[in-house]
């Protein structure tokens, strides 16, 4: 139950900048996901909030209190680590009770709380076991229990699902989301998995090279990516990015790629905002494209099927258009490799980025 | 293949005999009588084994010749002193070296490399080359011939070595566990005591044995700083037997007794000592 504010925070490790002049407000009781590739500084942000690292520049506030100088043990935040970091010499009960013992809770109170938390997470039967006697999923639950047992101000999770198998990950995702609703605590969740971010976060912070690329709800970052990086990072199947030049030719306005043209004359938004001659990148989400064996419009792009990846209810089709490969998803399961097909697109859903700056134009 | 195997076994047996024979001989000497030891031809296995000289050292029997009883008393005193000095040295050294090793293994601070180099450098200098200033300083501060003096000397020699060993051990322990303890409400010292220390137990056990045996065996400082005093430890006492009336059987018994504690300790803690050298994330996990 705390609002966390990072103000112009910078953190270096020797010569590398882990976090670069970052300003971020984490709202009270929010589920905020820090998302980005490895080495983007997201874990460092978490460590800075926990007090495990001190910022080189900038300040960190919990509500309105400046906490820069406060050591981790005085910040009253809980953390779940990627490796779970259970204490190997203690059994599950002592692991969970450890934060309470440090706070000098009375023995009876500790016992009551540990048992309550254990039953909440369904791990009563594990309490006498040592970490090495547990499976990955069980360890992860004990780590969660250790974090929530003392009702912290904020809950920091560093890729807590990355060591679980795929099935376990999906069920734990739902449980974590429910836990957040029940506990009403601020959650800061670090992951490199965009699917986790999309399914769990109230808001997503996309990071790269220690800077924030975009902050927004899952829908916002999916539908309106602010730059090429966000566009390529979000989405189960990555967005197709095709280099084009915006040209005016014979009274038409075209997006000219190496092997196809797209006539955008009738789309005022596009024509108004882009100057002729600008080099752009056309972004097309696989799910926004349709494929058919016959040409339905002038603007359809022709290509040959290069590969088919069936997924059961649909298939991912790789279509070779000139030198580019366009990925799209199709429910037509009859398509075969080598077939000539036509791709049509939904113009409302195309994304155009400036090639030089990478920023979104549309 | 078989020839290779035989060759290896032959080599191992030769080396074993080579290194074990002095120990064996010391033991044989200790259970022989002086008459038997000087008889010609010599007996490898004594005809009438005796535990007389062990009993003599522990004061269970007395010899008529007061010189021999005096020598035995002298060895007994050395044994007690050695045990006392080695015990105190290994406790204090391990305590200080584990804290130091933890800091050097885990934290970055300005001047870390330089200060560690200076600490290690004291190990690179041959002890004999600093013995004179050592003697002078100890004389000046009235530490010659005292327990605390020898303990300080042993600590000075052992702390850098143990710190180096433990630094390596601490740096292999997972950092996330320590961070978890900090977030869970431990200050630095409490996190060290409650989490890092128990996790480092194998390393610390091995370091303690190393400190004990080194202090127990140490000759040079003990010889120069305690000879002739009430604090004289076993190694200089044994050496002293040479300069007195030669009592080979007593010498053998003293040598055999001096070997027992290191052998017993290293046998009991063998797996810890091995782990200290072979530590890697896998063994840490195995321990966890």
Image (tube, rainbow, N blue to C red):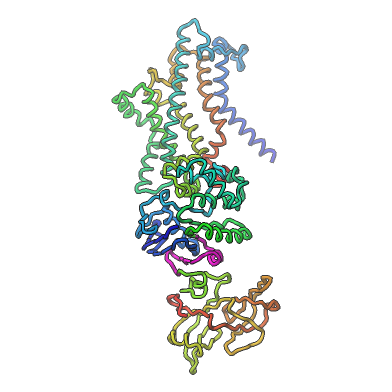
- Viewer-side residue, B43 vs A141: A141
Image: B158 above or below B48 = below
- Viewer-side residue, A29 vs B86: A29
Image: B65 above or below B239 = above
Q: Position of residue A353 (x, y in %)?
A: 47, 78
Residue B168 appears anywhere in the view: no
- Residue located at (61% from left, 84% from top): A302
Q: Position of residue A266 (x, y in %)?
A: 51, 90
- The quadrant holding residue B154 is top left
Q: Position of residue B184 (x, y in %)?
A: 47, 48
- Residue located at (46% from left, 56% from top): A154
- Viewer-side residue, B159 vs A308: A308
Q: Is residue A163 left or right of residue A353?
A: right
Q: Residues in magenta? A: A189-214
Hey, which residue is sitting farthest left in the picture?
B140
Image: A91 above or below B256 = below
Q: Is residue A206 magenta?
A: yes
Hey, which residue is sitting farthest bottom in the picture?
A250
Q: Quadrant of the N terminus of chain A?
A: bottom left
Q: Position of residue A250 (x, y in %)?
A: 49, 94
Q: Is residue B183 magenta?
A: no
- Viewer-side residue, B27 vs A281: A281
- Residue located at (47% from left, 90% from top): A248
């Amino acid at each position: 139950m705390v609002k966390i504010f990072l103000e112009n925070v910078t953190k270096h490790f020797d010569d590398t900048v882990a976090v670069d002049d970052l300003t971020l407000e984490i709202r009270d009781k929010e589920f905020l996901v820090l998302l980005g590739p490895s080495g983007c500084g997201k874990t460092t942000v978490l460590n800075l909030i926990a007090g495990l690292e001190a910022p080189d520049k900038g300040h960190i506030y919990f509500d309105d209190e400046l906490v820069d100088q406060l050591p981790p043990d005085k910040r009253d935040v809980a953390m779940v680590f990627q490796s779970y970091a259970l204490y190997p010499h203690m059994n599950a009960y002592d692991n969970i009770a450890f934060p309470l013992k440090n706070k000098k809770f009375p023995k009876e109170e500790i016992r009551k709380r540990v048992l309550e938390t254990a039953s909440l997470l369904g791990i009563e039967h594990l309490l006498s076991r040592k970490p090495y006697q547990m499976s990955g999923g069980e360890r992860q639950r004990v780590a969660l229990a250790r974090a929530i047992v003392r009702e912290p101000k904020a809950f920091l999770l560093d890729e807590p699902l990355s060591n679980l198998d795929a099935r376990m990950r999906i069920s734990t995702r739902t449980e974590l989301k429910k836990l957040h609703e029940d506990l009403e605590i601020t959650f800061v969740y670090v992951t490199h998995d965009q699917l986790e971010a999309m399914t769990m976060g109230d808001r997503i912070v996309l990071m790269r090279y220690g800077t924030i690329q975009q902050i927004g709800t899952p829908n916002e970052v999916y539908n309106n990516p602010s730059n090429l990086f966000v566009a390529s990072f979000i989405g189960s199947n990555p967005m197709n990015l095709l280099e084009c030049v915006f040209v005016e030719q014979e009274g038409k306005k075209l997006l000219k790629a190496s092997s196809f043209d797209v006539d955008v004359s009738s789309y005022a938004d596009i024509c108004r905002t882009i100057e002729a001659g600008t080099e752009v990148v056309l972004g097309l989400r696989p799910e926004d494209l349709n494929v058919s064996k016959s040409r339905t419009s002038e603007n359809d792009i022709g290509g040959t099927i290069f590969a088919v990846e069936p997924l059961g209810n649909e298939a991912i089709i790789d279509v070779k258009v000139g030198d580019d490969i366009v990925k799209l998803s199709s429910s037509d399961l009859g398509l075969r490799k080598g077939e000539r097909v036509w791709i049509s697109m939904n113009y409302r859903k195309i994304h155009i980025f400036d090639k030089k700056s990478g920023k979104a134009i549309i | 293949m078989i020839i290779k195997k035989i060759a290896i076994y032959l080599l191992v047996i030769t080396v074993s005999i080579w290194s074990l024979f002095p120990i064996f001989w010391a033991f044989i000497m200790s259970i022989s009588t002086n008459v038997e030891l000087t008889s010609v031809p010599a007996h490898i296995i004594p005809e009438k084994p005796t535990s007389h000289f062990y009993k003599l050292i522990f004061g269970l029997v007395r010899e008529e010749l007061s010189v021999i009883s005096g020598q035995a008393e002298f060895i007994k005193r050395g044994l007690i002193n050695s045990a006392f000095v080695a015990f105190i040295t290994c406790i204090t050294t391990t305590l200080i070296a584990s804290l130091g090793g933890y800091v050097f293994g885990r934290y970055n601070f300005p001047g870390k490399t330089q200060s560690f180099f200076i600490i290690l450098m004291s190990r690179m200098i041959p002890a004999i080359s600093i013995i004179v200033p050592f003697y002078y300083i100890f004389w000046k501060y009235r530490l010659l011939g005292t327990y605390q003096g020898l303990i300080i000397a042993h600590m000075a020699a052992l702390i850098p070595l143990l710190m180096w060993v433990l630094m390596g051990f601490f740096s292999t322990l997972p950092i996330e566990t320590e961070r978890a303890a900090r977030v869970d409400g431990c200050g630095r010292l409490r996190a060290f005591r409650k989490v890092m220390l128990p996790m480092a137990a194998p390393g610390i056990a091995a370091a303690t044995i190393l400190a004990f045996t080194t202090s127990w065996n140490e000759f040079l400082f003990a010889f120069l700083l305690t000879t002739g005093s009430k604090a004289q430890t076993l190694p200089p006492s044994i050496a002293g037997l040479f300069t007195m009336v030669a009592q080979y059987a007593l010498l053998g018994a003293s040598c055999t007794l001096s070997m027992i504690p290191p052998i017993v300790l290293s046998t009991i803690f063998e797996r810890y000592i091995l782990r200290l050298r072979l530590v890697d994330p896998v063994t840490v996990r195995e321990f966890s």
